[in-house]
């Protein structure tokens, strides 16, 4: 195969954990290929947001791109791991994306959609932040207006099942919507709460780790198949190194930096008890899982759940 | 090489009269073909450029303004302005400027302001002894106030172009002070010139009954921008929603209160607001292809490297930017310039630590001035047509006003507090 | 034939006006719904789709009136005959651009054909199709304008 030049679109600013992961990827790939593969990174959404990057990757406009959980909107079987309260922590989640079950989903997607995951890096969990009250138990969510994406059926069903009012608000309007009470709050990662300064207008954070979110290192399938074995090996390993670097940075920023900023700004950050998290999980999954089984088939959903169970047992997780 | 093909074909198409939107698209096509890239990119990036809920506010803003204009709201606003400032020396000139401030909420677009106010006020001013070109010059100079004071299509397009990181509500709030500053500066110049040339002032007074009547009539109109601005600022609705609510309000007023609209006129109002906004949409679409080409050719990086190699000081950077944008504004029209250069410069400004809202205001005001500078100033062209004056005369008469606007621009550039602190304080006072 | 064309033309104008009217109503409805029983999931998506279709088609009418922003200054200086020739040439280039967009859009539309939109659950090709369909309309308009330019060219010889 010929030498290759990659123009890769990502959406975070250059200092974001994901951008740093891609920088590690670029360094490895250029060095290991001896200059055979050239990498140029376009950060901050210069080539489009993750949804458009994914469309570009499908069409082969973009050979490699950053992907994230919006993948679940384009390829429905991927919804299975997007179930609220599925993973206990980011380590189990990371192991899931290295599992055989995910590998099978990935092969299916490569075949059906023409896009393949080379590596995945969980970047955190949704946690509730709201301006109204601390949340210690399921009942505390009752009647809270929580933001959802207008297009995400899954979060709408999940938040409603928890007793909250799902309110669609676009990304740019979240801050003012909280400050004026259009919404009480939302679920998002600690990192986003800090970046977007939501803590200025909402002072209650609950560490309930509901929905796990993830960044992908995606490649167009036709391009992938056109490469030599050697090139494929380099790109795959580069993606794994990038994902590992990103995972470490993101975990540290979520667990240390973000919590520090929240504490400095007088935010009441509280963990949720095991029992209450189980109640939240049961309530949300009771609404989401039947709908999901109908949409993508019970077989896939059961398989993903079983895989996560066995990973938890293997890793001795809680 | 690709960049040369891109630039050369763009300039040739542009100078040979091709509409800017297509010139941008065709030049990008030439660059894509030259770099052997897939044609799928064309529709892919056109779609990326257009698919946005915020963008839906554009036809709705235009619609709200269109309804108010067709419903005959121009007169009550000019009367209101005359009532407030007409007794100063150069009274009708001040009325023209103040009219633009009140009109700002209705159109949010400079050319609509020139057409609507100019067609009424220029003949009226000429009758009162003003030089016709001078009257037209005041009209086009003050027309830039409309896009600065909220609601502002210019800021919506800017927020769209740079991609969601700046809030439209904050931009709206940030535009109030600069808009009033521009109006004030223009009034000072008008007062001075009128004094020198002995232009009129109104000598009659309005009776109390007239004052009440005129105020009420204009308040009905001014509630509309109020809805939009307060709606967006309070977060009770999004920019798009407030534009829809304002349209409904305008319809209700014109059907039931003033009864100046007929049902049969509605389809043509909807259709013509679609046409006006389609010009902007198509520009966004093809510019999105262009920015892909520019980005992958490394232009943002070169520009950033250029600026950082010249200076590390953010104020020196802003000065360079002022000069560069004034130059760009002379050859490129407002919206294409915002769409093409907004994202590139916003990123560079971020690197210098410039407040994004402050930057947005400086950037947009800077480019707005280009509307009235030759050779390519659509404000000049529209003004000359509406005022029926020679372009040369108009250019000569508009110069002192542009000078005042440049002074305001520099003040805005070096006193960021005017765009950042004041809105913040206001928001705090109002409890947002 | 001419009558059919006029009918078709009025139908499209009405469709465009209808798009804008529906956008206004649907979004105003959303404001009311959110204040009362809770927000609906589809108004945002629907209004974006209607905007794409309505405005992209409306741009064809603007093109037909030679109303898109452009610099006529230099062409006007050249006089009517060279001006008409250049105008015709520019419209040929626009046709080439539009044809290229349509050509590329075929793959694009095909690739999203089976994907569903987030809340209306219709094919994602529906909004995307606005681009090639409008470009076809632009080509049609350009052909008419070229005929007009040729007529001017002949007349001013
Ligand atoms: Na305005
Ligand atoms: Na004016």
Image (cartoon, grey):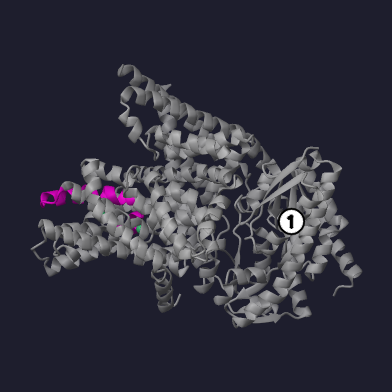
Q: Nearer the viewer, residue A26 or A312?
A: A26
Residue B70 location in percent, x, y?
29, 49
Residue at horizontal 47 percent and vertical 67 percent from the top: B236
What segment carries the magenta color?
B103-131
Instruction: Specify few, some or many for label 1: CA neighbours under 10 Å numbering under 14, 14-19, or 20 or more.
Output: many
The residue lying toward the viewer, choosing from B188 and C62, is B188
Q: Residue most toward the right?
A: A314
Q: Looking at the picture, does residue B190 appear above or below residue C126? A: below
Find residue B170 and report its image quarter: bottom left
Q: What's the magenta bit mostly, secondary-structure-wise?
A: helix
Q: Is residue B428 left or right of residue A94?
A: left
**Residue that appears at 76% across and 58% down:** A242
Quadrant showing the C terminus of chain C: top left
Residue B286 colored in magenta in the image: no
Q: In the picture shown, does residue A165 fall above or below A105?
A: below
Residue B53 seen anywhere in this rendered image of the structure: no
Q: Which residue is mark 1?
A: A216
**Quarter of the view holding residue A82:** bottom right
Residue B253: image quadrant is bottom left
Quarter holding the N terminus of chain C? Answer: top left
Q: Is residue A215 left or right of residue A33?
A: left
**Residue at the location (52% across, 50% down)?**
C48
Q: Where is residue A135 shown, x and y percent of the image?
A: 66, 79
Residue C65 is at least partly visible in this image = yes
Instruction: Give coordinates of residue A290: x percent, y percent.
Output: 76, 60
Would residue C74 appear left or right of B171 to someone viewing this image?
Answer: left
Write the residue at 91% across / 68% down: A314
Q: Secondary structure at mark 1?
A: strand
Residue B87 lies, in percent from the top left, at: 13, 64
Q: Chain of mark 1?
A: A
């Amino acid at each position: 195969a010929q030498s290759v030049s990659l123009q890769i679109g990502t959406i975070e600013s250059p200092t974001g954990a994901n951008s740093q992961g891609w920088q590690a990827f670029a360094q490895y790939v250029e060095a290991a290929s001896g200059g055979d593969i050239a990498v140029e990174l376009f950060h901050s959404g210069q080539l489009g947001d993750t949804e458009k990057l994914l469309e570009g990757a499908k069409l082969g406009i973009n050979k490699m791109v950053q992907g994230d959980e919006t993948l679940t909107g384009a390829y429905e079987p991927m919804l299975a791991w997007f179930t609220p309260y599925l993973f206990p922590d980011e380590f189990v989640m990371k192991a899931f994306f290295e599992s055989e079950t995910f590998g099978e989903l990935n092969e299916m997607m490569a075949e059906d959609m023409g896009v393949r995951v080379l590596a995945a890096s969980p970047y955190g969990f949704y946690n509730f932040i709201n301006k109204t009250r601390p949340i210690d138990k399921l009942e505390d969510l009752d009647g809270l207006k929580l933001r959802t994406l207008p297009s995400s059926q899954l979060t709408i069903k999940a938040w409603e099942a928890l007793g909250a009012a799902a309110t669609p608000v676009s990304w740019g309007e979240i801050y003012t919507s909280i400050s004026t009470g259009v919404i009480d709050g939302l679920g998002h990662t600690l990192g986003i709460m800090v970046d977007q300064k939501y803590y200025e207008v909402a002072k209650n954070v609950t560490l309930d780790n509901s929905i796990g979110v993830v960044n992908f290192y995606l490649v167009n399938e036709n391009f992938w198949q056109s490469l030599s074995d050697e090139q494929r090996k380099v790109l795959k390993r580069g993606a794994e190194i990038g994902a590992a670097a990103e995972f470490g940075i993101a975990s540290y920023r979520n667990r240390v930096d973000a919590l520090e900023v929240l504490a400095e700004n007088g935010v009441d950050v509280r963990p949720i008890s095991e029992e209450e998290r189980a109640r939240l999980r049961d309530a949300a999954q009771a609404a989401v899982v039947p709908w999901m089984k109908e949409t993508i088939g019970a077989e896939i959903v059961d398989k993903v759940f079983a895989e996560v169970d066995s990973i938890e047992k293997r890793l001795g997780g809680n | 090489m690709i960049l040369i093909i891109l630039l050369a074909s763009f300039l040739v198409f542009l100078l040979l009269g091709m509409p800017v939107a297509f010139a941008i698209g065709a030049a990008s096509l030439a660059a894509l073909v030259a770099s052997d890239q897939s044609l799928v990119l064309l529709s892919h990036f056109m779609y990326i450029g257009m698919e946005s809920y915020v963008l839906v506010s554009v036809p709705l803003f235009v619609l709200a303004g269109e309804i108010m204009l067709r419903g005959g709201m121009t007169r009550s606003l000019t009367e209101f302005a005359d009532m407030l400032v007409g007794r100063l020396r150069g009274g009708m000139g001040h009325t023209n400027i103040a009219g633009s401030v009140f009109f700002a909420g209705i159109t949010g677009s400079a050319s609509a302001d020139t057409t609507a106010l100019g067609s009424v006020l220029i003949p009226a001013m000429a009758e009162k002894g003003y030089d016709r070109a001078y009257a037209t010059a005041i009209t086009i100079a003050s027309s830039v106030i409309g896009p600065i004071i909220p609601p502002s299509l210019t800021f919506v397009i800017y927020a769209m172009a740079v991609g969601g990181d700046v809030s439209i509500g904050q931009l709206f709030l940030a535009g109030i002070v600069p808009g009033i500053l521009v109006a004030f500066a223009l009034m000072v110049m008008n007062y001075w010139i009128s004094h020198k040339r002995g232009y009129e002032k109104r000598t009659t007074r309005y009776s109390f009954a007239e004052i009440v009547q005129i105020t009420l009539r204009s308040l009905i109109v001014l509630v509309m921008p109020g809805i939009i601005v307060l709606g967006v600022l309070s977060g009770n609705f999004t920019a798009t929603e407030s534009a829809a609510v304002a349209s409904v309000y305008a319809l209700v007023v014109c059907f039931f209160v003033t009864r100046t609209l007929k049902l049969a006129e509605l389809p043509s109002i909807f259709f013509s607001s679609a046409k006006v906004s389609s010009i902007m949409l198509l520009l966004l679409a093809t510019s999105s292809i262009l920015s892909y080409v520019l980005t992958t050719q490394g232009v943002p990086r070169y520009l950033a490297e250029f600026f950082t190699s010249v200076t590390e000081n953010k104020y020196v950077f802003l000065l360079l930017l002022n000069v560069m944008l004034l130059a760009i504004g002379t050859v490129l029209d407002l919206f294409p310039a915002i769409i093409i250069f907004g994202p590139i410069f916003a990123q560079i400004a971020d690197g210098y630590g410039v407040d994004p809202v402050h930057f947005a205001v400086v950037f947009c005001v800077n480019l707005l001035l280009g509307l009235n500078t030759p050779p390519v100033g659509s404000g000049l062209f529209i003004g000359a047509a509406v005022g029926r004056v020679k372009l040369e005369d108009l250019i000569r008469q508009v110069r002192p006003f542009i000078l005042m606007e440049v002074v305001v621009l520099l003040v805005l550039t070096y006193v960021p507090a005017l765009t950042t602190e004041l809105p913040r304080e206001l928001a705090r006072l109002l409890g947002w | 034939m001419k009558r059919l064309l006029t009918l078709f033309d009025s139908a499209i104008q009405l469709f465009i006006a209808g798009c804008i009217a529906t956008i206004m109503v649907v979004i105003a409805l959303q404001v009311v719904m959110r204040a009362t029983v809770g927000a609906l999931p589809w108004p945002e998506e629907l209004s974006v789709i209607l905007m794409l279709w309505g405005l992209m088609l409306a741009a064809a009418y603007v093109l037909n009136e030679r109303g898109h922003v452009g610099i006529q200054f230099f062409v006007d200086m050249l006089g009517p005959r060279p001006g008409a020739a250049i105008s015709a040439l520019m419209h040929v280039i626009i046709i080439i651009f539009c044809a290229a967009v349509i050509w590329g859009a075929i793959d694009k539309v095909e690739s999203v054909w089976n994907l569903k939109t987030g809340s209306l659950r219709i094919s994602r090709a529906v909004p995307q199709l606005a681009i090639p369909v409008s470009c076809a309309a632009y080509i049609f308009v350009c052909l008419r304008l070229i005929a007009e330019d040729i007529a001017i060219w002949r007349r001013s010889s």
